[in-house]
Image: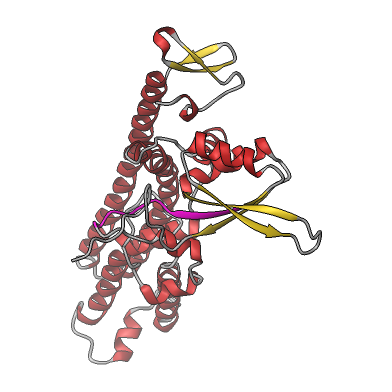
Amino acid sequence: MATQDIPTGEEGTTRAAGGQAAWTFRGHQMQPAEFTTAMVQLYQAEMRRANTWRTRLDTTTQWAVIAVGAAIFYAFTNTTYYGVILILSTIFVTLSLWIESRRYRYYELWSHRVRLMETDFFAAMLVPPFAPSPEWAESLAESLLQPDFPITMWEAFGRRFRRNYVVLFLILGVAWLARGFIYPTPAASLAEFIARSGFGTIPGSVILGIGLVYNGVLFLIGFATAGLRQASGEVLPKFGEFPVLGELWSSPPSGIERAARNVSTQGFRRRQQMLIWLISNKPKAIAKRILEDMHRGVTSLHGQGMFTEQEREVLMVAITVTEVARLKALVQTEDPNALLIVTGAQEIFGRGFKPFARPA
């Protein structure tokens, strides 16, 4: 591991015994092996947290399934209070759905941290040069110091509803219809079925109307939120669960987003590729730092400011998204007044990026 690739604290990096680079901070030293070990331990801890909350999700679903099964059994064996039993079961399943949605948000919190470490730390080890993004470290540290849910309650509610509870509510609805039409004897008409649905002085039409509105709202929330995709800890469907509904929540992809979707000819997803335009009063100093510290090529283009009519050198640099924060810090150190423009590149071919396709 090179010295410049090690996160620096107040005192930067030094050389420990044996000539190995060490991260120093407030008088303490941490060697690269110790830092990697700490990250592995943190990864395992966050993975265990995510698995624990995933188990809690399954437990809540099991409660709901048992409640539905028991409600159907008693509804078809009790000729008097079957409606009350099914209604109470529906309320219990809804409460279970709300509890599971809340637990799902906690699960997403731990999974979000796991994904941060997987994508920007461990994945960076596989794509030399190993240089974790400073923004990744700040995002992970912020999540540890000030935890915040990475997913809204609306998305959590809709996702759990579509994946598990939609079937349970359909079963309860079919059980209600079957029980009213069949028991104790088959209903001779629709009016007789509606009459059987009444409770005491409440007519059956009112009960059925409330049931339709109640379930209709649940289904509306469940499927109208199909386009929300903040969840990062789940393996989401490649083209969306419901592409038509997904369009309601999504905007046309920007150039950066389209660049992020590029897939190499070998089928592996590559890091997002960026094109940097840099205007500074110290172009040579910045270009030297980019060449030596980042090992990236720099192209100088001649330009002129139309307002000031001053001639300037414009630097053009091709990098990946994980190197943007490092480049920004480098430029800020050399020239805080520089102008930095970050754009997404559709494709970048050549050394260090996507290889040219070989002719057939």
Is 268 within the magenta? yes
- In this rendering, the answer to whether 68 lies above or below 138 is below
- In this rendering, the answer to whether 254 lies above or below 177 is above
The foreground one among 103 and 214 is 103
The foreground one among 291 and 80 is 291
Asked whether residue 211 appears in the rendered view, the answer is no
Total labels drawn: 0
Specify the segment rendered in magenta.
266-277
- In this rendering, the answer to whether 144 lies above or below 97 is above
Please indicate whether residue 209 sits to the left or right of residue 170 in the image: right
The color scheme shown is secondary structure
The foreground one among 211 and 55 is 55
> Residue 300, image x and y in percent?
58, 51
Q: Quadrant of residue 160?
A: bottom left
> Residue 261, image x and y in percent?
38, 61
Asked whether residue 206 appears in the rendered view, the answer is yes
- In this rendering, the answer to whether 95 lies above or below 322 is below
> Residue 164, image x and y in percent?
30, 60
> Residue 192, image x and y in percent?
30, 88
What residue lies at 45% left-to-right and 76% top-to-bottom? 213
Q: Quadrant of residue 1?
A: top left
Please indicate whether residue 282 sits to the left or right of residue 9 in the image: right
Is 75 within the magenta? no
Residue lying farthest to the right in this orientation: 308
Please indicate whether residue 154 sits to the left or right of residue 302 in the image: left
What residue lies at 49% left-to-right and 49% top-to-bottom? 150
What residue lies at 51% left-to-right and 34% top-to-bottom? 292
- On the rendered image, what quadrant is the C terminus found in? bottom left
The foreground one among 148 and 313 is 313
What residue lies at 43% left-to-right and 81% top-to-bottom? 203
Q: Quadrant of residue 357?
A: bottom left
